[in-house]
Image: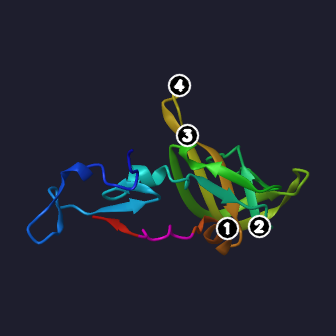
């Protein structure tokens, strides 16, 4: 019967004269999310479910799928909460400025100042990046609150 809680090289453990258990590789292994690993790599952390950016349908949050380099894009209010899969985009950038906003029916409403988040994709035919989606936040704290996620819990124990 195989014990899943033992290190992979448990067969390498042996006792010395002091009846202490020694490991030939002399490395301590930690448990991260129930997985026996030496340390989490950035690739492993990317798989941990932190690939979605929550966008709330709050007042002061707008979006557009038709960004124009001239800055004349019309931002429409976000009407429902969204989760954006950031792995589908090739680049993410941010900026500030004054932007045109529309009301719920799509008619020009007013010019608002705020922070904009651009989500870029690569066009294989044109062979260049383009902005496929943008979000405008007129309340500075809104993107900060939305992007906050508590840190993962610390590992509970060590395998020796």
- Residue 60 bears which disc, if any? 2
Q: Is residue 100 left or right of residue 22?
A: right
**Region in magenta:** 150-156
Q: Secondary structure at mark 2?
A: loop
Residue marked by disc 4:
125
Residue marked by disc 3:
121
Mark 2–mark 1 Cα distance, whole angstroms, equals 9 Å
Q: Position of residue 131 (x, y in %)?
A: 60, 44
* One can see residue 147 in this view: yes
Q: Secondary structure at mark 1?
A: strand
Mark 3–mark 1 Cα distance, whole angstroms, equals 23 Å
Q: Secondary structure at mark 3?
A: strand
Q: Secondary structure at mark 4?
A: loop
Q: Position of residue 15 (x, y in %)?
A: 15, 62
Q: Is residue 139 left or right of residue 32?
A: right
Residue marked by disc 1:
114
- Residue 134 bears which disc, if any? none
Task: Give the main secondary structure of the magenta stretch.
Answer: loop
Q: Earlier in the sequence, mark 2 or mark 1?
A: 2
């Amino acid at each position: 019967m195989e014990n899943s809680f033992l290190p992979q090289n448990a067969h390498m453990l042996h006792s010395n004269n002091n009846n202490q258990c020694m490991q030939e590789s002399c490395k301590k292994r930690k448990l991260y999310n129930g997985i026996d690993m030496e340390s989490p790599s950035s690739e492993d952390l990317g798989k941990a479910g932190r690939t979605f950016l929550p966008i709330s349908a709050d007042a002061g949050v707008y979006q557009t799928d038709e960004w124009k380099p001239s800055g004349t894009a019309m931002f429409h209010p976000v009407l429902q909460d969204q989760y954006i899969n950031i792995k589908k985009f090739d680049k993410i950038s941010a900026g500030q400025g004054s932007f045109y906003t529309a009301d719920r029916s799509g008619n020009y409403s007013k010019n608002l100042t705020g922070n904009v988040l651009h989500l870029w994709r690569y066009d294989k035919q044109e062979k260049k990046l383009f902005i496929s989606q943008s979000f405008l936040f007129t309340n500075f704290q809104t993107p900060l609150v939305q992007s906050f996620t508590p840190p993962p819990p610390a590992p509970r124990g060590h395998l020796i």
